[in-house]
Amino acid sequence: MIIVAPKYYKNFKCIAGDCPDSCCQGWEVDADDESLEYYKTLPDSLEIKQRINSVLDKDEFDNIIFRLAPKKRCPFLNDENLCDMHIAIGGEHTPITCRNFPRFIYDFGGTREIGISFSCPVAADLIYHSEESLSFDTEINSELPTLNDIDAELFIKLKQARTKVFQIIQNSEKPLDKRLCDLLQFAVELQNSIEKYDEGGNDIPFNEVFCNPELINPEWKEKVSNIKRKKIENTLSNENIASYFIYKYFLLAVYDKDVLSKVKMAVIGVLINTYMGENAWTMHLWSKETEHSQYNMDRYKKLLKEADALTAENLIELLNCD
């Protein structure tokens, strides 16, 4: 298996109880099947097993979850913002969501791409303040490739296109707003060569796109209400934001053939930073509110195609490319 990761990935380290915005607060956590089977093997007399059983519940999607405590805290998050489950039975037996966060892992046959998400404040700082353009470490291990049913021809096409996309984003000879315009134009052409893409039809204003129905942190609502349109700064942080979205989402178009929406996410990510704060914390808030809420992310994906404000043409106008 070929393992690909951004160079900054190896520098990530959870700071646990010192985190300014705990990942154990605000979200429901799924109890995956493997973890649930392990919990059944624990002695009934063990306090942690009793606590686990007392908070198991189901959400509206019929997923088994741990019911949150007041203030949307994980029921195992103690007063020191440390995990009682981790302490009692080891981190390897916490739910897979907890073990992986803030990492994302995508397998494409013989290649595994891994990274970290803006939703973690530490990860957000690493990505945002990286002192070089996004580049990757690659290694090979003995793990066998995973089986999948992806379209190999489309995957190769997308991989080649993504290389071109990174070249566009990282072309420092042009201002970033011009690069993002070039990126959108390239994506429109690429999308047309893959599958028809109908845009628009929903006249929701640009700022209301970010008024998520599931609010995790009230600070995000304040960010949205204070959106101020201005010119994009030609910074490495903005370039790295665009690169983050391309790395994380672009190749997933092999499953839905929707490459243009993935590219729009990269452009809008830079606009979010520009209009709402120009700092890593803003990107962290957006990610925690959107990328890690099924409600909010499903809504956002829908608006990427349907919102008039988010058509490729209107995004180009926002970038002031003329």
Image: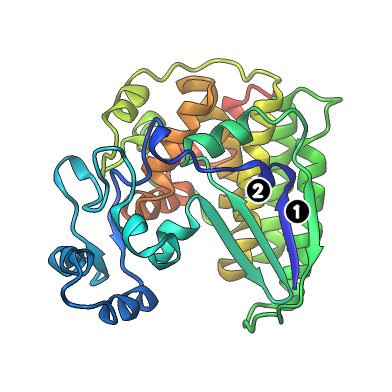
Instruction: Choose the circle earlier in sequence order: 2 or 1.
Output: 1
SS of the residue under disc 2: helix
Q: Amino acid at mark 2?
A: Ile
* Image quarter of the N terminus: bottom right
Residue 127 lies, in percent from the top left, at: 62, 36
Q: Which one is in front, 182 or 34?
A: 34
Q: Secondary structure at mark 1?
A: helix
- Decide if residue 138 is on the left or right side of residue 312: right
Would residue 244 appear left or right of 272 to someone viewing this image? right
Residue at image location 21% in from the left, 52% down from the top: 75
Q: Which mark is residue 162?
A: 1
Q: CA distance from mark 2 to mark 1?
A: 8 Å
Q: 59 or 99, which lies in front? A: 99
Residue 234 at x, y percent in the picture: 71, 20
Residue 316 shows in this picture:
no
74 or 285: which is nearer to us?
74
Circle 1 crowding by C-alpha within 10 Å: few under 14, some 14–19, many from 20: some
Residue 13 position by quadrant = top right
Please determine whether, in this image, residue 184 is positioned above or below residue 283: below
Could you tell me how many numbered marks the image carries? 2
Q: Is residue 212 visible?
A: yes
**Residue located 66% across and 46% down the image:** 9
Residue 2 coordinates in the image, percent (x, y)? 77, 68
The color scheme shown is rainbow
- The reply to whether the C-beta atoms of the residues labelled 2 and 1 are less than 8 Å apart is yes
User: Residue 80 — which label?
Assistant: none
Residue 168: image location, x then y, percent: 79, 39
Where's the C terminus, which quadrant? Answer: top right
Q: Which residue is rendered at x = 53% and y = 22% of the image?
A: 279
Any mark on residue 246, and which?
2
